[in-house]
Image (spheres, rainbow, N blue to C red):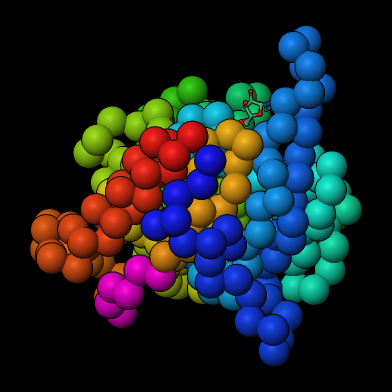
Amino acid sequence: MSSPNLPADGERASPASNTPFVEFSGLCVDFASSDGVVVALDRASLSFEEGAFVCIVGPSGCGKTTLIQTLAGFLRPTRGSVRLAGRAIEGPGADRGFVFQAPALFPWMSVAKNAGFGLMVRGEPRSQREAAVEKSLRLVGLWDFRNRYPYELSGGMQQRLAIVRALINDPKVLLMDEPFGALDALTREQMQEELHAIWRRTKKTIVFITHSVEEAVYLGTEVVVMSPRPGRIVACLPVPFARDAEQRDVRAVKSSPEFVAIRERVLDLIWRTADAR
Ligand SMILES: Nc1ncnc2c1ncn2[C@@H]1O[C@H](COP(=O)(O)OP(=O)(O)OP(=O)(O)O)[C@@H](O)[C@H]1O
Ligand SMILES: [Mg+2]
């Protein structure tokens, strides 16, 4: 059942004139399970430009992880396609960095070695590796901890290291699947500020999945709303907040009428899509 009040699937679809930077087109993903076929994504279409900070929200099980994993190249679509900078995704690659909900760090490697892992795999010379690791660890305040091991870091520090590790290869896109979900409220807000500052400084395209509508509206240049499974794109709403300062006044932004209006619009879309099922 569909609701006439909902925007069309793939609202704000790619402009016909030029190729979008990221393009999911008619994406379908079916999984075989013990109960038969599970349709995780059903003709999901979405596109956005380079430098966007795209936050994806939707009910649990709606296919958010499935969607981002097709862009990462971890999963192949059953039908449809995913393109990055005009090229079809055919598997994982160094042009995409991935940050998981639980920081996937190597426990036997020091902070510096974890940070530089991607460069080592690519065979970068040691001197260049060390310079890049120092620059990145300083960027997130972990330089003084470079000789420690992951178990000696707090959850927020581990997640910062995971972000460094994903960014060290200078990927075209940073993919983040609920990266702050396991953090306490205060650390989570601090990490939001840090990620916003990293995005401003590096101008990376970011795709960020979250269960928090407030987090999505605070961080995103656009917020994508997905329907309950089988996942479709219900809307892609632009978030027109000033992002010219690296540090923003969190309380002022989150209590502004513009912020509250978009947050309510996103929540309304989520509820209405759930009710329409
Ligand atoms: N490997 C798999 N085999 C079978 N079913 C799967 C597999 N991976 C995901 N699914 C199913 O596909 C659907 C979408 O899963 P997905 O993990 O993408 O949802 P999600 O939106 O990320 O949920 P959450 O918010 O809880 O993380 C779910 O119904 C899930 O059970
Ligand atoms: Mg998920």
Whether residue 8 is visible here, answered yes or no, is yes
Q: Is residue 273 above or below residue 132?
A: above
Q: Nearer the viewer, residue 176 or 213?
A: 213
Instruction: Give the total of numbered labels.
Output: 0
* Image quadrant in which you'd find residue 184: top left
Q: Is residue 44 magenta?
A: no
Q: Is residue 115 above or below residue 38?
A: below
Residue shown at 28%/39% (left/top)? 187
Residue shown at 75%/73% (left/top)? 85
Residue shown at 27%/61% (left/top)? 262
Residue 7 in percent (x, y) is at: 47, 61
Q: Is residue 98 above or below residue 199?
A: above
Left or right position of 171 against 246: right
The residue sitting at the bottom extreme is: 17
Q: Is residue 241 magenta?
A: yes
Residue 117 in percent (x, y) is at: 71, 45
**Which range of residues does the magenta coloring cover?**
238-244
- Per the picture, the main secondary structure of the magenta-coloured stretch is loop
